[in-house]
Image (tube, helix red, strand yellow):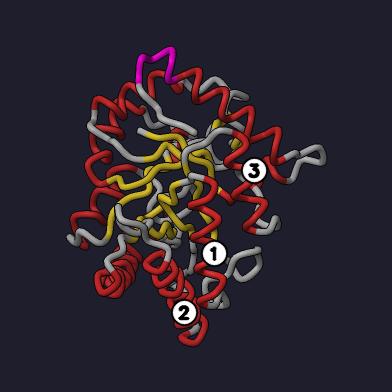
Amino acid sequence: MRLGYSAWAMPRLPVDEQIALVRAAGYAGIELVSSPTGSLDAQRVDVAERRRIRRLLDDAGLALPSIAAHGDLLEPDPQTRGANLSRVQAAIDLAADLAREEGPPCVVTMGYGRPEGYLAQREAIAEGFATLGRYAEQRGVVVALEPHVGQAFDLPERVAWLMERVGSPQVRLNLDNSHFEVMGCDLATYIPLLAPYAVHTHVKDQRGRSPQHQFLVPGEGDFDYSRYLREMARAGYQGFITVEISVMVQRRPDYDPRMTAGCAFATLAGAAAGAGVRLAHG
């Protein structure tokens, strides 16, 4: 496994600074974020800029395991729904253009919907991911569902249903376990169930139970990362363990992206050493 950091933690910083910060903190890879409100928008990045980003990553020695790009495919307005689909498809194109020899990064996107609407909405969400999977197949890219507390796909068994329902190798899982943790799920149950579908992960710390939960910087809570890493290794996962910093943390008046990246790195690297699990980093 390898240790990465998501640019979700610093959406307003230019891509150059995001890459430099992650490299300086010692990570092995970075997740970029495509958003119309952030510093990188796949729908506006021209060929020259794509080549420049690829050079920046190569010069920094950073892998690019994923690009996050969210768009609600349950949006009732057809025009808005079409725009959301185009946004995620543009990120798929960007992933293909930024590919290296080992292949392109996956594209992480959420399912949306509401927990109480799961049964009514799950088929529509599955069809949306099947549509993305067909588009991604043309570009050789994998789309990864990010489960999310407060959305229709919020529990491990629901995620497993979606993976089997879509049944496409182009539609896999971004295993963000924090959302299961704040719902009281135990990693000894959800990791063996979901790791076979996972192509990427997010980790953060957490406190409390939904809806009164808080997402935290790794090390601020009492989550056992050594146990987590042992379970992931036991389940055969070999990809990136990527730190994601919640908007909850970013809203703090004293939030410092550089200090936060360093603290998270120390927590995960220490946990890996304590667990006897290899977690490669820069």
**Sequence order check, earlier mark of 1 and 2:** 1
Q: In the picture provided, is 176 more to the left or to the right than 205?
A: left
The residue indicated by pointer 1 is 34
**Sequence order check, earlier mark of 3 and 1:** 3
Q: Which mark is residue 236?
A: none
Label 2 – label 3 distance at C-alpha: 35 Å
Quadrant (top left, top right, bottom left, bottom right) of the N terminus: top left
Q: Is residue 36 above or below residue 256?
A: below
Q: Is residue 245 above or below residue 1?
A: below
Q: Position of residue 253 (x, y in %)?
A: 82, 41
Check disc 3: other Cα within 10 Å, few if <14, some if 14-19, many if 20+. many
- Helix, strand or loop at label 2? It is helix
The amino acid type found where label 1 is placed reads Ser
The amino acid type found where label 2 is placed reads Arg
Which contiguous range is marked in magenta? 272-277
Q: Quadrant of residue 216?
A: top right
Label 3 – label 1 distance at C-alpha: 18 Å
Q: Nearer the viewer, mark 1 or mark 2?
A: 1
Q: Residue at x 42, y 57 (%)?
A: 108
- Helix, strand or loop at label 3? It is helix
- Helix, strand or loop at label 1? It is loop
Check disc 1: other Cα within 10 Å, few if <14, some if 14-19, many if 20+. many
The residue indicated by pointer 3 is 21
The residue indicated by pointer 2 is 81
Q: Is residue 254 above or below residue 73?
A: above
Label 1 – label 2 distance at C-alpha: 17 Å
The front one of 58 and 118 is: 58
Q: Residue at x 27, y 39 (%)?
A: 195
